[in-house]
Image (tube, rainbow, N blue to C red):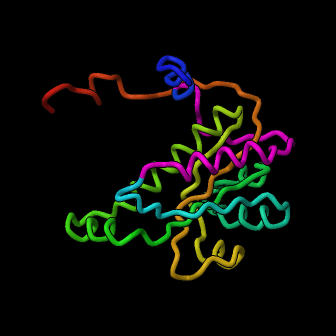
Amino acid sequence: MIDGPELLGLLSSRQSERRYLEKPVEREKIDRITEAGRLSPSASNGQPWKFIVVDEPDLRLKVAAATESIMLNMNKFVRQAPVLIVIVREKSNLSSRAGDLIKRRDYSLIDIGFATASIVYQAAAEGLGTCIIGWLDEKKIKEILGIPKSKKVELVLTVGYVENTLRNKSRKPPGEVISFNKY
């Protein structure tokens, strides 16, 4: 079992990667990464997700193109990643949806966040880099992957081997974001 300091080290070393090596990712690692997402907690165990692993080169390039913005010069690096994981929001179970209505909060989005975090940290533990992509052409990705119109494509994750050059993390100091017993 991983200990506290070891886990904190993993959390502090994970970063968004935008340069990938031309090296395929082993299926066993992808299986463990997606399993980490599958095992994530969710409101009332609703599990409102489906993970689509895209590793077939031509299909991957089409999905990557659906994350790019020529005008803003964004996300061209997505084409380099040997694996993409498309995260689709599914309908949650009845008790979770009831909670959504009662509390006027969409818990499925929080659940997608938990699953995404689990996936990217498992990938880091496997020695792989990731980047979470929210800028995407949902309609195009649905068409490419045959995703039903009633579903919602939330994110695309890039996954692959990287050179592992750590950058300095810019984070607010603990005193600005952590307090005890009062705001």
Query: In the visual, does 68 lie left or right of 9?
Result: right
Place of residue 129 in the rendered image (x, y in percent of width and height, measured from the top left): 68, 38
Q: Is residue 160 left or right of residue 40?
A: right
Give the residue displayed 53% in from the left and 43% down from the top: 118
Question: Which residue is at the front of the view, 125 or 69?
Answer: 125
Give percent across and percent down for residue 62.
76, 67
* Residue appearing at x 56%, y 59% in the figure: 155
Residue at 72% from the left image edge and 49% from the top image edge: 77
Of 57 and 119, which appears nearest the observer?
Answer: 119
Membership of 15 in magenta stretch: yes
Q: Residue 78 versus residue 124: which sits nearer the camera?
A: 124
Question: Which of these two is toward me, 18 or 127?
Answer: 127
Residue at left offset 65%, top offset 75%: 140
Question: Where is 18 relative to 175, above or below?
Answer: below
Q: Please state, as top left, top right, bottom left or bottom right, where the C terminus lies in the image.
A: top left
| Snapshot quadrant of residue 65 | bottom right
Relative horizontal placement of residue 182, taking residue 107 as reference (left or right): left
Measured as percent of width and height from the top left, residue 92 is found at 42, 68
- Please check the rendered image and state whether residue 133 is part of the magenta-colored stretch, yes or no: no
The image shows residue 171, relative to residue 101, as above or below, that is above
The outermost residue toward the bottom is 149
Q: Which residues are magenta?
A: 12-41
